[in-house]
């Protein structure tokens, strides 16, 4: 492990790991994967990826990813076993199993998104480095590689243009992006679907961004919330970065692993 974990967090993870049946729900970008300029190139840190694979194989343990990305994008970047449930589009899209995918957007939703994009795309095309990421029920305008004053100006220009074009949109500010959606859902909604489906004794949720607070705010009782980074949070525990989160996941995976069979394996 890279840095020592907070003793209170180690104690909380150990207590959580001792429960009979658990759900481990993890945000992706900024929590498992360090931020990069091209979203398709983001990858979970190797130690986190390995711990997720181990947790997915552990008894009475469900590990899921809960992301603002579309399901397709999350599956491409996440590279987790197909048995790992995925929640995409901030709770709107849910893949509980490979043959159980809940559709996110209707044809009417798509038409509304297309109409909005026709208004916003020309504004984005005028700014070097800005681009649009499509999602089933909306899109994000990315500004990570735009110079900061132009990024701020573009963000406010598209916010206002979108508000005028479609006043009922859901608008989210993310890290170097602004996002518009024609359907309202939160990561809290996505977490509720997972909880209902898998009926765990407790949930661990970890995330770094404002949208993760919707899920962290729904935790109760024996649940365990972990904030990644220094931003304000309702979570009771914190790690500083994805490396710290990898350390937590490795500890949890080791505690949840199937005990080695004793006996006469080695003569
Ligand atoms: O809920 P998350 O899994 O944290 O997803 C949030 C957004 O992540 C992606 O954008 C962010 O990460 C990119 C790759 O590091 C980075 O280039 C971008 O600046 C970040 O905002 C993703 O592209 C978005 O769709 C997600 O909403």
Image: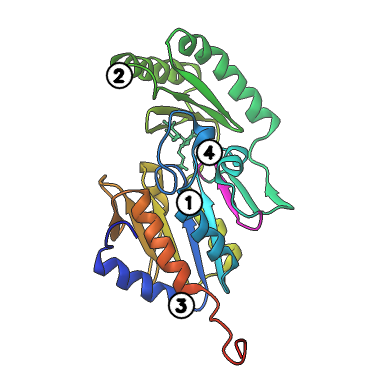
Q: Are marks 3 and 2 in contact (CB under 8 Å)?
A: no
CA separation in Å, label 2 and label 1? 31 Å
State the SS at label 3.
Answer: loop
**Would you call the spot at circle 1 few (<14 residues within 10 Å), some (14-19), or many (20 or more)?**
few
> What crowding class fits label 2: few (fewer than 14 Cα within 10 Å), some (14-19), or many (20 or more)?
few
Locate the C terminus and report the quarter of the image it occupies.
bottom right
- Whether residue 244 is visible, yes or no, is yes
Task: Give x and y (percent) for residue 92.
Answer: 57, 43
Name the front one of labels 1 and 4: 1
Which residue lies under the disc numbered 3? 19
Tell me if 137 is positioned left or right of 234 in this view: right
Alpha carbon separation for disc pair 3 and 4: 30 Å
Whether residue 217 is visible: no
Residue 263 to residue 103: above or below: below
Q: Position of residue 10 (x, y in %)?
A: 31, 69
Q: Secondary structure at mark 4?
A: loop
Asked if disc 3 and disc 4 are in contact, CB closer than 8 Å, the reply is no
Asked if the residue at tag 2 contacts the one at tag 4, i.e. Cβ–Cβ closer than 8 Å, the answer is no
Which residue is under mark 2? 148
The yes-or-no answer for disc 4 within 8 Å of ligand 1 is yes
* Label 3 CB sits under 8 Å from any ligand 1 atom: no
Q: What label sits on residue 69 in the rendered view?
A: 4
Question: Which residue is found at the position 56% from the left and 60% from the top?
Answer: 53
Nearer-N-terminus badge (4/2): 4
Given the current orientation, which residue lies at the most extreme front position?
Answer: 267
Dot placed on the residue nearer the N-terminal end, 3 or 2? 3
In this rendering, would 247 be left or right of 43?
A: left
Q: Which mark is residue 46?
A: 1
Where residue 127 appears, as percent x and y from the top left, is: 42, 10
The residue segment tinted magenta is: 82-90
Q: Quadrant of residue 148?
A: top left
Asked if labels 1 and 2 touch by Cβ distance under 8 angstroms, the answer is no
């Amino acid at each position: 492990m890279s840095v020592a974990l907070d003793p209170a967090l180690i104690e909380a993870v150990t207590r959580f790991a001792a429960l009979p049946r658990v759900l481990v729900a993890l945000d992706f970008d900024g929590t498992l994967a360090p931020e990069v300029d091209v979203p398709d190139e983001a990858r979970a840190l190797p130690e986190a990826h390995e711990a997720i694979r181990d947790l997915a194989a552990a008894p009475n343990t469900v590990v899921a990813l809960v992301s603002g990305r579309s399901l397709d994008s999350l599956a491409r970047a996440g590279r987790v076993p197909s048995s790992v449930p995925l929640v995409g589009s901030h709770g709107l899209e849910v893949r509980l199993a490979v043959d159980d995918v809940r559709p996110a957007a209707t044809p009417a939703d798509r038409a509304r998104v297309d109409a909005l994009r026709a208004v916003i795309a020309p504004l984005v095309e005028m700014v070097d480095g800005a681009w649009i990421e499509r999602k089933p029920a909306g899109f994000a305008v990315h500004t990570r590689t735009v110079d900061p004053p132009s990024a701020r100006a573009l963000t406010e220009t598209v916010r206002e243009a979108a508000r005028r074009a479609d006043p009922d949109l859901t608008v989210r500010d993310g890290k170097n992006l602004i996002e518009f959606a024609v359907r309202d859902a939160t990561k809290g909604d996505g977490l509720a679907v997972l909880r209902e489906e898998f009926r765990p004794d407790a949930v661990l949720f970890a995330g770094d961004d404002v949208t993760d607070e919707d899920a962290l705010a729904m935790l109760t009782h024996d649940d365990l919330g972990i904030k990644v980074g220094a931003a304000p949070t309702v979570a009771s525990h914190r790690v500083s970065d994805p490396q710290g989160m990898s350390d937590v996941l490795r500890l949890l995976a080791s505690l949840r692993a199937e005990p080695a069979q004793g006996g006469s394996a080695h003569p």
